[in-house]
Amino acid sequence: MSHEPAPDSQILQVRDLVVEYAVARGSVGAVERVSFDLAKGEFLGIVGESGCGKSTLLFAIAQLLSAPAAITGGEVVFKGNNLVGMTDKLLAASRWQDLSVVMQSAMNAFNPVKTIGAQFKDAIRAHQNWSREKIRQRSAEVLRLVGIDPVHVKSYPHQLSGGMRQRAMIAMALLFTPDLIIMDEPTSALDVVAQRSLMVQIKELQQQLGFAVIFVTHDMSLVSHFSDRLIVMYAGQIAEAGETRSVFDSPAHPYSKGLLEAFPSIRGPRVHMTGIPGNPPALLDPPPGCRFAPRCPVVMPRCHDTKPALYTVGEVAVRCLLYAKGEVHV
Ligand SMILES: Nc1ncnc2c1ncn2[C@@H]1O[C@H](COP(=O)(O)OP(=O)(O)OP(=O)(O)O)[C@@H](O)[C@H]1O
Ligand code: SF4
Ligand SMILES: [Mg+2]
């Protein structure tokens, strides 16, 4: 499929991406026409409730989906090449070297019967014909980068704490100094203090090495501190997207407002956590109009049968009919 050449500053362009899971009763539209751009060195946060399609979107970007999930529309243009439909051989070359992934289940992603060093070596050997000495040096280097003593190349995963295993996963993702690291809740299994220190470290590494990050989390306070830009997903779609500061200072979408109210204020005094009553809709048969209509505190009659587009409101894009007078963004 043809596409515009990527401007130099952009590393990733996701265009109208659609992902469906084929199930017995039809198809579950887990990602519905998602579009966004990512600049070199940018930190993009993606938030949203459980089941809204965050992991599916990340898997689709990294071309790691397997049946019953499939990309049924759109493009993922990474460094000027559309990854959708690319052969496995070409993809394998890009993955790990230019783009690496730290998935939600990273805590268990290491093989328990191999040392950390042996697993780093396997990852390197899959792509590069480096000497044993070079592999040893690079493995020690990436462990040092994430604050782990290089003696741990000889350790087995169970000999590391949870936080160290997460760091070791990130070290593995850094082996080839990629341009983009995709992280799916890399800190969620850690306690609050360990989460913070890992995030600070990821941010420092990003500033030092210049890679871009797509970071999925449930934790609004983490994204508020660390991400440049934010996408709020609801029921497989972008509900709101923009600079993190703009979304936090004045959330426009009723869902973003609810999500922010559900978390204690990070600046002001602790507030009552109201949350958003109800649950996201089943994606096998989503509401015909706005997908948030069944839960929206400011729902209007037309919301039940009119699908909102993404409208530009000041600095952000918002999928809500309250802003339908705005310029259509996508
Ligand atoms: N194997 C599957 N078959 C059918 N539907 C699936 C399958 N896996 C996921 N889904 C559906 O896809 C939707 C998105 O799931 P996904 O795991 O991407 O959400 P998520 O936002 O990452 O959630 P969480 O925050 O819990 O990790 C869910 O509504 C789920 O029902
Ligand atoms: S379109 Fe209607 S139901 Fe949907 S978020 Fe906006 S006001 Fe609420
Ligand atoms: Mg997930």
Image: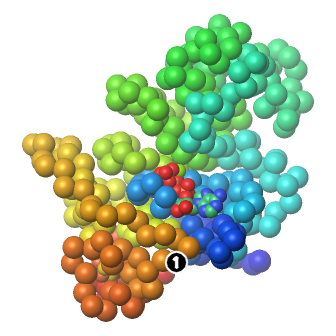
Please give the residue where the numbered disc 1 appears in the rendered image. 285
In which quarter of the view is residue 250 placed?
A: bottom left
Q: Relative to 228, say whether 324 is above or below.
A: below
**Number of numbered discs:** 1
Q: Quadrant of the N terminus?
A: bottom right
Where ligand 2 lies, by quadrant? bottom left
Residue 153 seen in render: no
Which residue does the image show at 63% across and 30% down from the upper left?
A: 108
Q: Secondary structure at mark 1?
A: loop
Q: Is residue 147 left or right of residue 325?
A: right
- Local crowd size for mark 1, using a 10 Å CA cut-off: few (<14), some (14–19), many (≥20): few
Q: Is residue 198 left or right of residue 82?
A: left
Q: Relative to 125, say whether 234 is above or below.
A: below
Residue 39, how many percent across, how many down?
A: 53, 57
Which residue does the image show at 33% across and 86% down from the upper left?
A: 303
Residue 186 seen in render: yes
Residue 149, how many percent across, how many down?
A: 58, 11
In which quarter of the view is residue 37 placed?
A: bottom right
Which residue does the image show at 40% across and 30% down from the upper left?
A: 195
Residue in front for this viewpoint, 241 or 41:
241
Label 1 CB-ligand 1 distance < 8 A: no
Which residue does the image show at 60% across and 35% down from the upper left?
A: 106
Residue type marked 1: Asp
Residue 154, how many percent across, how many down?
A: 71, 9
How was this image coloured?
rainbow
Q: Is residue 75 left or right of residue 36?
A: right
Residue 158, how many percent across, how many down?
A: 62, 16
Which residue, as the protein is rendered here, is positioned at the far top? 151
Residue in front for this viewpoint, 44 or 299:
299
Which residue, as the protein is rendered here, is positioned at the far front? 24
